[in-house]
Amino acid sequence: MHIWKNISKIPYWFFYLVYDYWIRNKLKKINESDVDLEKEEFWLQKKILHYYYKAFPYYYKGLGLTGEESLHEYPFLTKDVIRNHPEWFRCKYEHYLPIHSYSTSGSTGVPLSFRTTPNHDPVHQRMLWKIMGYKKGDRIVLINGNLLSDEKIEKKIFYNFLSKKQMPYGGYELSCLYLLEKTAEDYIRCLDELKPAFIRGYSHAIFRLAQYIQKMNKKFDFKIKGIQLTAEKAFDYQVDFIEEVFRTKVYMQYGHSEACVFAYTRADDKRYRCSPLYGHVEVVDDEGRPVKIGEIGEVVVTSYSNYAMPFIRYRTGDLAEYGGRDGSVVLLNDVQGRKQEVIYTKSKETMTQAEFVTKKAYSHMVKWRIVQYEYGKLIFRIVKGPDYGPVDEEEIKRVYERNGEFEVAFEYVEDIPLSKRGKTILIEQHLES
């Protein structure tokens, strides 16, 4: 039976490799100005919608769809629909697919389970590394939130070996779960041992590491060719600081486990470029209408490579500023994070925390979190950096209280725990949206 399971998946892998080769060749021109990939995207979109209609009959029946609709005639897919109608997402061909299952708590704390097939993220990652200047033999260190063995922690070895190949996600993983002031010197020693040409990982973890490096006045005897920030919102002050400390360029990458969007920035352009060969990207307002250039809306995506679930016009909950198009490439001026990650004014209006960032004060904190229990009242929980002082506290109060809609209080603590996956939680919201 085990042998038959593997044999049954051969047709999938054949088509996957053919598509991967085709996409790799098409990606060679994705960074050209006013690039034209309209025909290629239309072909991918037509193929996947035709497949979804055959593979997920209960989904189409439940929504009253015929399969003849154009993409923009499909209703939005929400997380609640996925949770409330699991029967809609049973695939007729699942025995022929290599399927990975995921379960995330998300920003709201309500679990979401979904499935994916191997997608075309690796070929896109290789494209991004090439842009960043990767050469064969360069070492990549991934900074993430993986757990380490007690033996390694005791020996103060905070990394694991992953692969000699390095591509596309790194050859070593350096866990940020144990990064504190008392361990910072050991983390710097680990980097000295590994001597990476590139670093990839969580924005806030790399920023904290940069703070410790600056505090200890550490200078590396090797060149870091580039840093890729992913998985978390990266603020401008963090990008500037990381580039200054590591003396290199920072690139951002935005995507999801659902395999619907691959977006990235370049050294000369901080706008996110969304690959039309990975998925279709829209930015819509609360009524589902497309926003104008410069306006902020919710990111809605359609996957071109996930055969395990029909992610069609899927509302991600992420907020982004729409930047128009560069030919076939959708541009996002900024990705602001989860729609649920908002703060509430006294009049119960919502605002994103990103609207209030103050470069000087935030750069003096090692860790911070905004906690809200009441409308218009914010608690700043802060781990002070060496340069943090009363001036920074006054700056934060001035920025947040400027319109009379917020009262700010402060709690100074020794540490703020990360999420189970090692990510930084910036807003702990106790009010219902």
Image: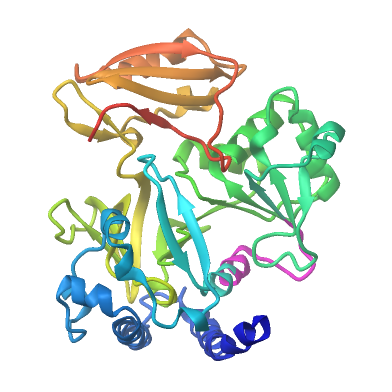
Q: Residue at x 38, y 79 (%)?
A: 35
**Residue extent of the magenta highlight:** 126-140
Q: Quadrant of residue 129?
A: bottom right
Q: Residue at x 49, y 84 (%)?
A: 26
In the displayed structure image, the side of residue 222 where residue 266 appears, left or right: left
Expressed as whole percent of the image width and height from the top left, the position of residue 271 reads: 40, 57
Expressed as whole percent of the image width and height from the top left, the position of residue 377 reads: 28, 17
Q: Residue at x 45, y 59 (%)?
A: 255
Expressed as whole percent of the image width and height from the top left, the position of residue 6 reads: 63, 84
Q: Is residue 58 above or below residue 133?
A: below
Q: Residue at x 44, y 32 (%)?
A: 426
Q: Quadrant of residue 333?
A: bottom left
Q: Nearer the viewer, residue 385 or 95?
A: 95
In the displayed structure image, the side of residue 336 where residue 237 appears, left or right: right
Q: Nearer the viewer, residue 81 or 261?
A: 81
Residue 273 visible at all: yes
Residue 311 visible at all: no
Q: Is residue 27 above or below residue 428?
A: below
Q: Is residue 300 above or below residue 94?
A: above
